[in-house]
Image (cartoon, grey):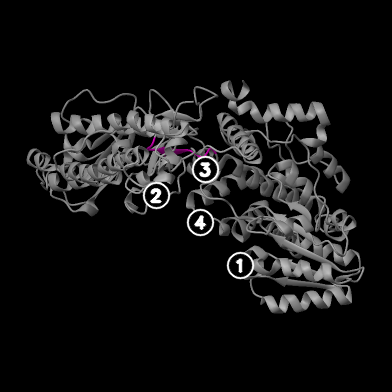
């Protein structure tokens, strides 16, 4: 019932049941200790560390070896760069001499994976020294079942919560090293900055649970990056007589985090987050990260008191801690629930694939597939006579949108033909007229799972929709282009219908260039959000294009001014529909203008705060289409949108609010669920 009515509450329901049955420890998993794993191990049982993203126990193993005064007998080999024969020789020596052999990242060496079972056989066939241990680190992929059975398995993942990551940071080196933590020089600055750095690192990792709303691309930072940054920050505070917080903040950003990000939007978001967690007045006044006072810089001095404060924090932090809107938590919990339920289905051997037989009689699954194909075929739109459209919309320098119409209809016809052909072939396969190939089986599995098949994606614009929503969007696009051909160039353009949405901005610029007889370098675009579409039938060239069908993620729009606001109107919705977006071309000041130019001058209000809002094809943001590279769902364009902000704020501060909220425009609308 919870899954059907409130899917975002499934995770909380599971936690409540676990808490009632087993206690709070179930939902608050303590950090794994290398020492505990070692104490439960035997020389004949290798310790297999199954890694999560951004995790590596190598440093903890080396630190533990130092504590045991065993560093001289510790041998670490990197599987990527060492030949298998050398690793085998090192293993035999370690078994005899009682050494610890650490084989790092064996997943990166396919040949070593093929031989790993022989290493286990070598251990079982010998009588290893009582001090011998084999430590293996790997991602849980392509390992033989025997390796799992014969190992002591340790799941080693970086905690994905602020509380969990802070606990790990404050229970491992270098913070647990008294010489490091109790710095004699400028102790107050050091402790507050180290906590702010650890808090920022933890927030960066937990923010990934919000997927593309949190970060466009996964941020590949780990414990090593944090510890390296801590050590460097300690040296900077120790070396210089005075160190400002802004310089330390920039130091952390440039040294580690920004360098690990390939997306410029993520770099800006990181800068905004560090300003929140690492404020200029951190040392003087401390800092409170949330209004309720739960998350703050603790005014304590002893290490155990820091740990006690961290242990008091909630298991999962609210979206507001990361600068995200409240509705982002609902999406986050839906994703967590889907992951948990998918894992349960896999554990029980459940599958969403149909049972396809080679006999002439249809199975129950095949009958359902046949019914689905018969339902889909009439809903697929028809193709368009391109030659007739060319006659009605001839190519001309004065109207670049005619070229766009022809271009869109050509690729659309190819897509429609492929959709119909694939459905016809599957129907013939189910009726026994054609052999059911692997390609058709994959296609059938996708339809049965209500997913857009890969065969369709090869010719279609990128999509994140389910099968039913995708077909409905195809029909809406067909209606839009049909009206364009029948009634003439529309006053508004429904952007989700376009393969190449960038072409609308190009056409607006080129139309103005030809209209005013100026070069393309003399014109630019201004973007304005309007509360409703224009009432005029024929939009003048100087007005550009009016766009509909867009959604704004992580922000709202003021009805009267069209400016960005943080009020989402509903705490349950992560997106707001943009009524109309105007792409208006204008001439740049100082450009050579014709006598028509005065009508196209636009006041761009340079003193207005703006946010460079990225526009993406889909909510996935990064997926590309190899068949149509221009139709990627990466960055389509960046649109400067006015912000309803305090005039006293500087432009960067006003925009940082929306960087933290993950604000972006989506062309493909999200389903309102």
The one nearer the camera, 495 or 602, is: 495
Residue 279, image x and y in percent?
Answer: 65, 45
- In front: 208, or 271? 208
The residue to which callout 1 is attached is: 110
Secondary structure under the numbered disc 3 in the rendered image:
helix
Give the magenta part as a residue range: 661-668
Front tag of 3 and 4:
3
Residue under circle 2?
A: 437
Q: Is residue 32 visible?
A: yes
Disc 4 element = loop
Q: Counting residues from the N terminus, which is met first, the one under dot 2 or under dot 1?
A: 1
Q: Residues within 10 Å of mark 3 (few under 14, many from 20)?
A: some
Q: Are marks 3 and 1 in contact (CB under 8 Å)?
A: no
Which numbered tag is attached to residue 167?
Answer: none
Nearer the observer, 610 or 333: 333
Q: CA distance from mark 3 to mark 4?
A: 14 Å
């Amino acid at each position: 019932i919870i899954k059907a009515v409130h899917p975002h509450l499934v995770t909380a329901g599971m936690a409540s049941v676990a808490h009632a049955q087993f206690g709070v420890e179930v939902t608050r998993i303590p950090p794994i200790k290398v020492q505990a794993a070692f104490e439960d191990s035997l020389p004949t049982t290798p310790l297999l560390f199954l890694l999560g993203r951004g995790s590596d126990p190598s440093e903890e193993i080396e630190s533990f070896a130092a504590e045991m005064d065993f560093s001289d007998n510790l041998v670490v080999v990197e599987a990527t760069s060492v030949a298998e024969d050398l690793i085998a020789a090192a293993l035999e020596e370690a078994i005899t001499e009682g050494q610890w052999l650490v084989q790092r990242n064996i997943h990166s060496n396919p040949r070593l994976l093929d031989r790993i079972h022989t290493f286990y056989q070598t251990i079982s066939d010998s009588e290893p020294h009582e001090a011998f241990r084999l430590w293996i680190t790997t991602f849980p992929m392509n390992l033989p079942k025997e390796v799992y059975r014969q190992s002591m398995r340790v799941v080693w993942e970086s905690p994905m919560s602020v509380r969990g990551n802070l606990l790990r940071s404050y229970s491992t080196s270098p913070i647990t090293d008294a010489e490091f933590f109790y710095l004699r020089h400028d102790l107050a600055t050091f402790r507050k900055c180290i906590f702010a750095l650890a808090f920022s690192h933890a927030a960066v990792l937990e923010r990934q649970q919000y997927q593309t709303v949190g970060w466009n691309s996964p941020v590949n930072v780990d414990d090593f990056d944090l510890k390296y940054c801590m050590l460097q920050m300690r040296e900077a505070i120790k070396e210089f007589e005075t160190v400002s917080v802004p310089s330390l903040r920039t130091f952390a950003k440039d040294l580690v985090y920004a360098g690990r990000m390939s997306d410029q939007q993520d770099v800006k978001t990181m800068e905004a987050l560090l300003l929140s967690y690492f404020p200029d007045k951190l040392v003087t006044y401390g800092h409170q990260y949330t209004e309720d006072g739960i998350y703050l810089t603790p005014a304590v001095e002893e290490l155990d008191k820091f740990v006690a404060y961290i242990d008091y924090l909630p298991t999962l932090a609210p979206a507001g801690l990361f600068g995200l809107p409240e509705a982002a938590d609902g999406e986050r919990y839906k994703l967590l629930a889907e992951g948990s339920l998918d894992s349960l289905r896999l554990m029980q051997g459940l599958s969403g694939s149909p049972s396809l037989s080679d006999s002439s009689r249809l199975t129950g699954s095949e009958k359902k597939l046949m019914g689905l194909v018969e339902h889909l075929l009439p809903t697929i739109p028809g193709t368009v006579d391109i030659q007739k459209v060319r006659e009605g919309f001839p190519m001309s320098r004065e109207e670049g949108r005619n070229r766009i119409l022809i271009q869109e209809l050509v690729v659309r016809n190819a897509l429609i033909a492929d959709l119909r052909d694939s459905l016809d072939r599957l129907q013939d396969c189910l009726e026994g007229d054609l052999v059911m190939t692997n390609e058709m089986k994959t296609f059938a599995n996708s339809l049965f799972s209500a997913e857009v098949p890969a065969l369709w994606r090869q010719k279609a614009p990128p999509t994140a929709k389910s099968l039913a929503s995708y077909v409905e969007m195809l029909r809406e696009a067909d209606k839009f282009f049909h009206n364009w051909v029948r009634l003439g160039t529309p006053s508004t353009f429904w952007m989700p219908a376009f393969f190449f949405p960038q072409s609308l901005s190009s056409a607006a610029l080129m139309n103005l260039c030809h209209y005013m007889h100026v070069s393309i370098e003399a014109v630019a675009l201004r973007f304005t959000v309007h509360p409703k579409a224009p009432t005029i039938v024929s939009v003048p060239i100087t007005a550009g294009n009016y766009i509909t069908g867009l959604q704004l993620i992580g922000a709202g729009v003021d009805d009267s001014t069209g400016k960005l606001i943080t009020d989402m109107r509903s705490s349950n919705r992560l997106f707001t529909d943009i009524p109309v977006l105007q792409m208006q071309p204008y001439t740049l000041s100082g450009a050579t203008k014709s006598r028509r130019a005065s009508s196209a001058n636009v006041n761009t209000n340079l003193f207005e705060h703006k946010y460079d809002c990225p526009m993406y094809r889909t909510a996935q943001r990064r997926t590309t289409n190899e068949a149509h590279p221009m139709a990627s769902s990466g960055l389509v364009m960046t649109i400067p949108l006015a912000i309803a902000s305090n005039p006293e704020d500087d432009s960067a501060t006003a925009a940082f609010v929306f960087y933290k909220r993950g604000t972006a425009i989506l062309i493909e609308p999200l389903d309102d669920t």
